[in-house]
Amino acid sequence: MIHPKLVLHFLGLALTASPALAQAPQPWELGLQAAASPVMERISSLNGYLTYLIVGIVLLVVGLLALVVIRFGEKRHPVPATFSHNTKLEVLWTVIPVLILLAIAVPSFKLLYYMDRTQDAEMTLKVTGHQWFWSYSYPDHTPVGMDSFIVYEDSLKPGQKRLLEVDNRVVLPVDTTIRVIVTADDVIHSWAVPALGLKTDAVPGRLNETWVRITTPGTYYGQCSELCGANHSFMPIAIDAVSKQEFQAWIDQARQKQALAK
């Protein structure tokens, strides 16, 4: 008899595999991917804020250049001015950039501190980078773990994404604070999933820590973001975000499979 939890789990994975719920790069995409974590929401907000600020600076500089060209051109001033400095202008072009830098630094540092350490983690995911695949383990759910390799183009099934699909996806629960420990066993890699605001270097001999709290069920794609050798571009990441009940059903099934494999 098939356990009801397993049925629920497979239905959930089928839904999250739908392209409509998959977060991945799109052709001609100019903006950031839709945020699916509190960190990414704040990154998107800061990006929007900085965009408005930068556009304002560009318009100001272009406007000042136009003013100087029109007002102080040769036709209006055939005899050039001979002054060497202007105290008011010098104060302004010192104070205004300082204020702009403060306007950028304050929200940036707030976001960095928010991203820095996990608060009250409910579970841990350990990620290890290799040339050229990822290994995952769940220390709170031993002995669950797996290696994750790219599915090459000639093996893709309909609906799967070229250069982004893997043979074993990471499965994580939504609405759960997850500590992510990242390391490597050969060269430096970088574990990055844009829609979740994740990008952490995997350094041999070092454990780097980040965290994620996924807010929306779905499938989220990423890639190694540190040049790590000949097959660097063939190290994709795929995460299935499911409900807590579906996650527990997956853990139970994974434990059964590993027990049978022994």
Image: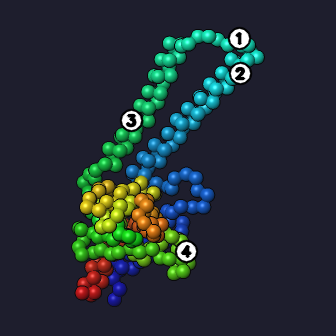
Instruction: Name the foreground residue: 180 vs 9.
Output: 180
158 with respect to 124 (left or right): right
Q: Earlier in the sequence, mark 2 or mark 3?
A: 2
Q: Nearer the viewer, mark 2 or mark 3?
A: 2
The residue at which mark 3 appears reads as 106
Where in the figure is residue 154, as x and y percent of width and height?
A: 54, 80
Amino acid type for the residue under numbered disc 4: Gly
The residue at which mark 1 appears reads as 79
**How far is the residue under mark 4 from the one under mark 3?**
43 Å
Q: Are marks 1 and 3 in contact (CB under 8 Å)?
A: no
Considering every residue shown, the one lying at the far right of the view is 75
Where in the figure is residue 136, as x and y percent of width and height?
A: 32, 70
| Residue 236 visible in the shown view | no
- Say which mark, if any, is on residue 162: none
Instruction: Name the foreground residue: 37 vs 75.
Output: 75
| Residue 89 visible in the shown view | yes
Residue at (32, 55) in percent of width and height: 210
Q: Nearer the viewer, mark 1 or mark 3?
A: 1
Q: Earlier in the sequence, mark 1 or mark 3?
A: 1
Q: Earlier in the sequence, mark 1 or mark 2?
A: 2
Residue at (51, 13) in percent of width and height: 88
Q: Nearer the viewer, mark 1 or mark 4?
A: 1
**How far is the residue under mark 1 from the one under mark 3?**
46 Å
Where in the figure is residue 140, as x and y percent of width and height?
A: 23, 67
The residue at which mark 2 appears reads as 70
Where in the figure is residue 115, as x and y percent of width and height?
A: 34, 49
- Say which mark, if any, is on residue 159: 4
Residue at (31, 65) in percent of width and height: 184
